[in-house]
Structures are given as structure tokens and as C-alpha cells.
Image (cartoon, helix red, strand yellow):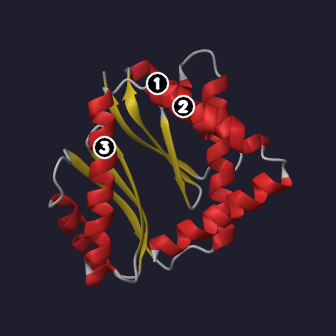
């Protein structure tokens, strides 16, 4: 189910790029490259995180008990953040159990909510809110916004990264004041 959601998002982003003359794609690629080079994690840790995310995605996809769940996965510095929706409480336990069995994960934050899968219009709005939060973080001179990973699910903003305590507080304050943000949840690790 979560694969289908990703396809909708890809289609929407592609259409937006075509309509916007692809300038957004060029800027997005530049920010992505700068972000990877500017990351506080080692290159090896970045690769391990991508591998762990793929393993976790594979484990969840193969688990037939989770077929009706919508789960999005982000791994940062060995910490997995799981967001999405599941129709019943038993699935939340199954998601956590499945994630705990994945190699190279230090910690799992299961933030999957009980409920129906959110519609594509909400996912599109989440992308918009994510862009606004990232822009606000990068534009604020008090912190280096490139050190912060932003994940948005149903207007809830999750902030990840290796940051100092004062950077975490500033980032939360910035995100909290962005239009469209319902709630900010810290998933930071301290330096």
C-alpha cells in the first residue's frame, strides 16, 4: 500500500516540475547534493542508513499481516522513523516487531497512527508543508538547516538529525511557526 502512495507522490511531483519548467527539479537536486555533502554522519553511516531503510521496507512489504498498512520509512544514524496509518492496534505491534528484527537499526520510533490511509490530496499538502519547513530551516541564520531531516505525515512534522540542544529548540520553534503544521515531534540525537 505504501508503494502505491509513493507512486502518486512521484506523479504529482513530476507534473509540478513539468508545469514549473523543471526549475524546482534542478534546485531540489542541488539542495540534495549539498545536504549529503554537508551531513554530520560519515559517508559509511549514510550508506548504512540507506541499506537499513531498504531492508526495513522489504521486511514490511513481505509481512502479510501489514498489507493494509501505509508505512513510510526514514532512517537517520541508525534510528528508524516509521510514519503512516494502520487500521488496527495489532498492526502497530506487528510493525514494531518487524522493525526490531532489521539489522543495523539502533532505535525505532513507531509513529504510525491508527486510521485509514490518508488521501493523495493530504500527501500533496504534506509535500508542500515539508518544503516550507525545509525552506524556513535553511533560511534561518541561527542554525544550519541542512543538518535537519524533515518528514511530514498528515501535517505532523518530524525533525531528525544530529544536533546540539539549542539547535533542536530553534528548529522546533521554526517548524512550529510554519503555516500548515499541526504538530512538531523531535526525533533528534544530541551531539
Residue 9 drawn above or below residue 138: below
At horizontal 78% and vertical 41% (from top left) the residue drawn is: 23
- Badge 3 marks a residue whose secondary structure is helix
Expressed as whole percent of the image width and height from the top left, the position of residue 46 reads 33, 36
Query: Does 178 sit left or right of 162 as displayed?
Result: right
Expressed as whole percent of the image width and height from the top left, the position of residue 78 reads 25, 42
Callout in the foreground (3, 2): 2
At horizontal 33% and vertical 27% (from top left) the residue drawn is: 41
Query: Dividing the picture into quarters, in which one does residue 60 lie?
Result: bottom left
| Real-space Cα separation, disc 1 to disc 2, in angstroms | 6 Å
Residues packed near mark 2 inside 10 Å, few (<14), some (14 to 19) or many (20 plus): few
Whether label 1 touches label 2, CB < 8 Å: yes
Residue 113 drawn above or below residue 29: below
Residues packed near mark 1 inside 10 Å, few (<14), some (14 to 19) or many (20 plus): few
Q: Which residue is mark 1?
A: 37
Q: Which residue is mark 2?
A: 33
Residues packed near mark 3 inside 10 Å, few (<14), some (14 to 19) or many (20 plus): many
Query: Does 113 sit left or right of 127 as displayed?
Result: left
| Real-space Cα separation, disc 3 to disc 2, in angstroms | 17 Å
Expressed as whole percent of the image width and height from the top left, the position of residue 87 reads 40, 82
Q: Quadrant of the C terminus?
A: top left
Tell me if residue 123 can be seen: no
- Badge 1 marks a residue whose secondary structure is helix
Q: Which residue is mark 3?
A: 49
- Badge 2 marks a residue whose secondary structure is helix
Tell me if residue 119 can be seen: yes
Amino acid at each position: 500500500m505504501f508503494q502505491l502512495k509513493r507512486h502518486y507522490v512521484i506523479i504529482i511531483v513530476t507534473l509540478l516540475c513539468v508545469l514549473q519548467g523543471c526549475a524546482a527539479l534542478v534546485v531540489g537536486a542541488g539542495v540534495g547534493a549539498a545536504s549529503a555533502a554537508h551531513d554530520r554522519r560519515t559517508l559509511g553511516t549514510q550508506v548504512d542508513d540507506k541499506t537499513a531503510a531498504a531492508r526495513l521496507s522489504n521486511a514490511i512489504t513481505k509481512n502479510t499481516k501489514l498489507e493494509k498498512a501505509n508505512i513510510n520509512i526514514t532512517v537517520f544514524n541508525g534510528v528508524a522513523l516509521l510514519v503512516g496509518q494502520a487500521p488496527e492496534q495489532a498492526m502497530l505491534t506487528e510493525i514494531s516487531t518487524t522493525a526490531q528484527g532489521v539489522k543495523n537499526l539502533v532505535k525505532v520510533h513507531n509513529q504510525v497512527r491508527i486510521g485509514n490511509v490518508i488521501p493523495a490530496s493530504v500527501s500533496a499538502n504534506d509535500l508542500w508543508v515539508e518544503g516550507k519547513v525545509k525552506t524556513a530551516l535553511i533560511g534561518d541564520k541561527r542554525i544550519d538547516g541542512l543538518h535537519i531531516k524533515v518528514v511530514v505525515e498528515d501535517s505532523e512534522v518530524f525533525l531528525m538529525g544530529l544536533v546540539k540542544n539549542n539547535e533542536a529548540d530553534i528548529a522546533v520553534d521554526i517548524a512550529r511557526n510554519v503555516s500548515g503544521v499541526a504538530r512538531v515531534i523531535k526525533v533528534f540525537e544530541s551531539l
